[in-house]
Amino acid sequence: MIALKIIFWILLFIIIYTYVGYGILLFTIIKIKRFFNIGTKTKIDLTYEPDVTLFITAYNEKDYVAAKMKNSFELEYPKEKLNIIWVTDGSDDGTPDLLKGYPNTTVHHVPERNGKIGAMNRGMAFVKTPIVIFSDANTYLGKQSIRRIVNLFSIDKVGCVSGEKRIIDKESDVAAGAGEGIYWKYESALKKWDAELYSVVGAAGELFAIRTELYRPVEKDTILDDFIISLRVAQEGYTIQYDPEAYAIETASANVKEEFKRKIRISAGGIQSIVRLRSLLNFFKYGTLSFQYISHRVLRWSITPLCLILLIPVLTILAANEGFLSLGLFSILFWSQLIFYAAALLGWFLENRETSVKILFVPYYFFIMNLSVVLGFFRYIKKSQSVNWERSKRAS
């Protein structure tokens, strides 16, 4: 029983550290650095204003073209310095034709569908500016986003800048919207602290930028192109910085089914990324970046969901030995675990009912997030995830 207790505490530590502990540790380190003024913050040059390219890959996005272009032209950056490139591989709904005639905009279209990463690899040959900013066709950028991103590139060691992904916040929402919104608010806080400690560990594809010279063609079967591209920049000794005021905003997934589909794909891509970026696990070479990468990403996409599964039988055995109705530590934790999963089940029953008490859906979202990792692992093993991904349906 002693061995089982040791296993229990190890499992519990990994779970708590992954989802809460790392954030607390990160916040504490940042507070200490600020208090003792450790590290000098490099001054940003607000006059830095190079030519930039807004790079958009699209597959059958005609419904978003007009709004995306309107949004792009409203961005507060010199119009003569903002070039827009659309790469529309495989689009057959008229998207390329709709883009014709817009100023400072070029369209590179081929009839074959090669997936998003294929389009990115092909389209980067047409980028002639020192900075390239990637954005999705269905996301809209804050007016100051380009300028704020460019400001950070005035610092030589910055190789990539990640913007913030925001989910439109409704007063009342269903499970998909409530869960995704809360998740991204927490993720944004972690990214802000990661950047202050050293570097963000992976950019969000809705809005991120790199120095064009640092782009390296990515393997054609890559699932998480934004994650791989940004971290390979970090591997070269540059940092990934973050500005929450440079943001891309979109609606949440239309429903839990669509969000679950998206999460499984991301999880399969996460396992693929761990394999391809395995050199980042070397603390001796990458130091702080390795610590952040493992704590923020690797644990979530690998052993922690397994720990959650193993915790169920381990805690059940310990609680049974102690007595389920006793007031012992393990019996209390057993019933707490049971209540949590019951709350997840309640979230499943109520998933399509709007409520202003959004925290009600946190256990359910947490459950599907970890279940998607398990399913994503098997999808990766079977090599059944296509790079020709159909974008998840978004809420209206």
Image (cartoon, rainbow, N blue to C red):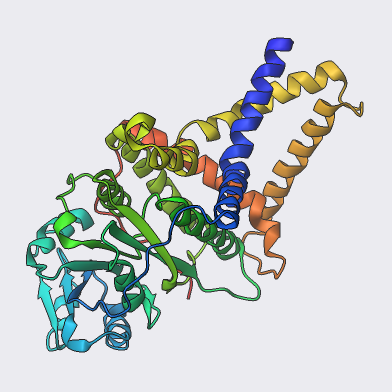
Residue 279 pos. (x, y %): 29, 32
Q: Position of residue 168 (x, y in %)?
A: 52, 74
* Residue at x-position 38% and y-position 81%: 144
91 w.r.t. 146: above or below: above
Whether residue 2 sits left or right of residue 99 in the image: it is: right
Residue depicted at x 78% and y 31%: 334
Task: Work out which quarter of the rendered image holds the N terminus and state it.
Answer: top right
Decide if residue 374 is on the left or right side of residue 286.
right
Q: Is residue 341 left or right of residue 321?
A: left
Vertical side of 392 occupied by 21: above or below: above
Q: Quadrant of residue 178?
A: bottom right
The answer to whether 91 is drawn above or below residue 179 in the figure is below
Q: Quadrant of residue 20?
A: top right
Q: How many marks?
A: 0
Q: In this view of the protein, which residue sits in the foreground, 163 or 361? A: 163
The answer to which of 267 and 103 lies nearer the viewer is: 103
Asked if residue 393 shows in the view, the reply is no
At a point 33% along the width and 50% down the height, the residue shown is: 227
Residue 10 position within the rendered picture, expressed as x and y whole percent measured from the top left: 63, 24
Q: Is residue 337 visible?
A: yes
Q: Is residue 231 left or right of residue 95?
A: right
Q: Nearer the viewer, residue 389 or 168?
A: 168
As drawn, 141 above or below 312:
below
Residue 177 position, x and y percent, is: 56, 65
Residue drawn at x 74%, y 37% is 337
